[in-house]
Amino acid sequence: MILDRFRMDGKVAIVTGSGRGIGRGIAEALAETGCGVVCTARSADQIETVAKGIEASGQRAIAVPCDVNERADLENLVAAAMKEFGRIDVLVNNAGGSPPKAALRTSETMFNHAIHFNVTSAFLMSRFCIPHMLERDGGSILNISSGLSWMVEAGFVAYGTAKAALNHLTRLLANEFAPRVRVNAIAVGSVETDALGPFLENGDLKQKMESLTPMGRLGTTDDIALAALYLTTPASSWVTGKIFEVDGGTVASNWPLDLSGV
């Protein structure tokens, strides 16, 4: 049966930044496939809530507080997953971000932090998890990137550069570890999450963004989670090194505000 290709019974996934938003949506979706889930983020309360909800649905889950900017936290996260489950099959590098800032106001420290938060952390997590994947049947890594990795928009020089680097990290790792470990990414468009929420309180802004989106609406966490299920399960067993654009069909930025002076 074709839908059986989406089953992950007995498998284990680590999802960073899974306390809310896209990360939470992906963690809960993977649990529905039968996958055990390691929920991790800086906020212990949030990931505990997500893990308890998954367990209430009948799947195994643990919550491990982690700051992906701290190497020791990443090592502890992988060790906790192995101690609890004895295997790692899927890694979703979702944690990341960087606030908008005009290029000439972006400090070296801010730029370097964007690279570390979005790229270095994903590299280290991949480096720590891949050996465990190779001990068994291989695995799948999914990096959550952004449409700003290829679109241009004033105010996102640090974030956009970091996500572009994450895209190529995806391709390089995919090439090196194929066929046993697949590595893909999702270039996410404008999704209604807590991060975008404060901007969307202005109803006119939301309407403008929707009018600039061919599909006529902003994305939801389910839109991203569904794409993540395809890319992390055997359903996409012939796909690696690809950047999937899940963005409502946008071919240019749908951000109507001028952030060049921020």
Image: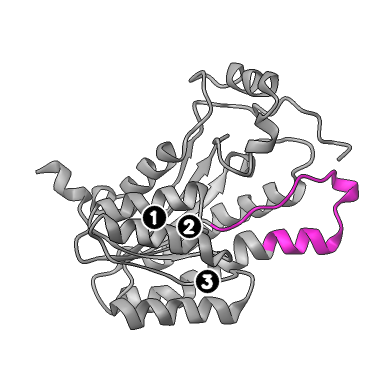
Image height check: is 193 above or below 20? above
Q: Is residue 225 visible?
A: yes
Q: Is residue 156 left or right of residue 82?
A: right
- Label pair 3/1, CB-CB below 8 angstroms: no
Residue tagged by mark 3? 65
User: Under tag 1, what secondary structure?
Assistant: helix
- Label pair 1/2, CB-CB below 8 angstroms: yes
Residue tagged by mark 1? 27
Q: Spatial distance from mark 1 to mark 2, Cα to Cα?
A: 6 Å
Q: Residue at x 81, y 29 (%)?
A: 258
Q: Spatial distance from mark 3 to mark 2, Cα to Cα?
A: 10 Å
Residue tagged by mark 2? 18
Q: Which residues are magenta?
A: 95-115
Color style of the picture:
one colour
- Disc 3 or 2, which lies upstream in sequence? 2
Position of residue 53 measured from the top left corner of the image (x, y, whole percent): 35, 56
Q: Is residue 240 visible?
A: no
Residue 209 covered by magenta stretch: no
- Disc 3 or 1, which lies upstream in sequence? 1
Q: Quadrant of residue 14?
A: bottom left
Name the kind of residue labelled 3 in the image.
Pro
User: Under tag 3, what secondary structure?
Assistant: loop
Name the kind of residue labelled 2 in the image.
Ser
Q: Nearer the viewer, mark 3 or mark 1?
A: 3
User: Under tag 2, what secondary structure?
Assistant: loop
Q: Residue at x 74, y 52 (%)?
A: 158
Q: Is residue 70 left or right of residue 124?
A: right
